[in-house]
Image (cartoon, rainbow, N blue to C red):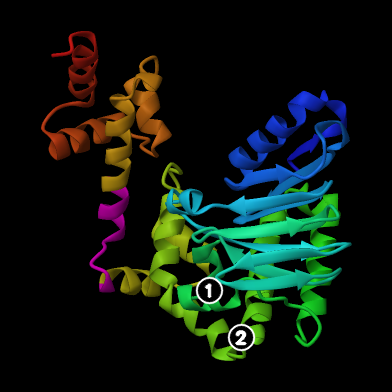
């Protein structure tokens, strides 16, 4: 696990804010109502990351967690959570449904819509955070599956729950150099359990095709600063051929090289105008966005924006120094 918090080491007055800060910065923005006096409040959080998959193991005193309509509206990149009940019970509420979870049960919910998690007797659960593009299910399917108990009656439920529990509990997996390798099979297993719950096995296959373009773009975004970004590296991560990658992008009118160059140039343009990077050299900013050849970068920047990177930076520095 990469980050941990145990409120027993904190003064009671500082506990709620410490929990809120870690959850908001590293997990999801939610309102947390601790149902006990601050002196009795206890929260233990352990966070980990395996590729696209985020993991949050939680033990806490009684709490109510709410994703309000305002917070849901502010989310420009919603994700899907899988909540695995380890002991005790909890209730997941979303889209007018309620799922009562008991040990070994799990449920999905979507940060793009309001939800409530009720833990009247305390929290003993592990939460898995998955980007929508990685889960590769249509929005309608995610909505239909949210706040639905996945447990007895689903032939994949026990297998999935056992696997997820082992994943969260084994530090050799989430703490090892090979942790990214477990992300894809974990998401595939979760997808299979959800589609079985919905009674539509075809969903486990079709979305991989229908959302492929979005997943290619998401991968390009995620690795934009990597100088090694190429059709070959993206295709390898998505387990498709380079030829098929180009064919999928072509259907959307996208040329790989043009898209990457434009996004990198836009990134450098923003950074060069940002006071936060005022002490960084132009070359350092260019490298931050994946450019390795300073001459090529300057030529591309001038061709795109009609001035050199230094001229662009000077223009914005002058505007900050002498505002009109």
Q: CA distance from mark 1 to mark 2?
A: 11 Å
- Mark found first going from the N terminus, 1 or 2: 1
- Relative to 251, is 308 on the left or the right? left
Front one among 267 and 181: 267
Give neighbour class at mark 1: few <14, some 14-19, many 20+ (Cα, 10 Å): some
Residue 111 screen position, x and y as percent: 54, 58
Query: Can residue 130 be seen?
Result: no
- Residue at 20 percent across and 38 percent down: it is 300
Residue 70 screen position, x and y as percent: 47, 49
Kindly state the secondary structure of the residue where label 2 is placed: helix
Image quadrant assignment for residue 209: bottom left
Residue at mark 1: 143
Query: Can residue 206 be seen?
Result: yes
Kindly state the secondary structure of the residue where label 1 is placed: helix
Mark linked to residue 198: 2
- Magenta range: 251-261
Image quadrant holding the C terminus, namely top left
Q: Main secondary structure of the magenta part?
A: helix
69 in magenta? no
Q: Residue furthest top?
A: 321
């Amino acid at each position: 696990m990469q980050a941990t918090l145990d409120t027993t080491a904190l003064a009671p007055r500082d506990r709620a804010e410490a929990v809120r800060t870690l959850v908001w910065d590293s997990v999801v923005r939610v309102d947390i109502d601790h149902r006990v006096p601050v002196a009795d409040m206890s929260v233990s959080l352990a966070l980990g990351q395996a590729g696209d998959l985020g993991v949050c193991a939680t033990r806490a005193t009684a709490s109510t967690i709410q994703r309000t309509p305002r917070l849901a509206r502010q989310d420009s990149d919603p994700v899907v959570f899988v909540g695995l009940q380890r002991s005790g019970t909890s209730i997941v509420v979303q889209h007018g449904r309620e799922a009562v979870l008991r040990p070994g049960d799990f449920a999905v919910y979507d940060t793009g819509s309001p939800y409530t998690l009720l833990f009247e007797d305390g929290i003993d659960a592990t939460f898995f955070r998955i980007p929508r593009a990685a889960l590769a299910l249509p929005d309608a399917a995610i909505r239909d599956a949210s706040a639905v108990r996945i447990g007895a009656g689903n032939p994949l439920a026990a297998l999935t729950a056992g696997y997820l529990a082992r994943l969260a509990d084994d530090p050799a997996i989430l703490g090892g150099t090979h942790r990214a390798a477990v992300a894809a099979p974990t998401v595939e297993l979760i997808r299979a359990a959800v589609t079985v719950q919905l009674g539509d096995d075809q969903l486990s296959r079709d979305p991989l095709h229908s959302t492929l373009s979005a997943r290619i773009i998401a991968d390009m975004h995620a690795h934009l600063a990597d100088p090694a970004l190429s059709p070959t590296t993206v295709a390898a991560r998505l387990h498709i051929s380079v030829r098929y990658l180009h064919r999928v992008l072509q259907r959307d009118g996208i040329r790989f090289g043009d898209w990457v160059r434009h996004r990198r140039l836009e990134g450098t343009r923003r950074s060069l105008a940002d006071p936060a990077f005022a002490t960084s050299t132009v070359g350092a900013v260019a490298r931050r966005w994946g450019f390795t050849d300073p001459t090529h970068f300057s030529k591309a920047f001038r061709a795109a924006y009609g001035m050199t990177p230094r001229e662009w930076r000077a223009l914005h520095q002058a505007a900050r120094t002498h505002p009109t």
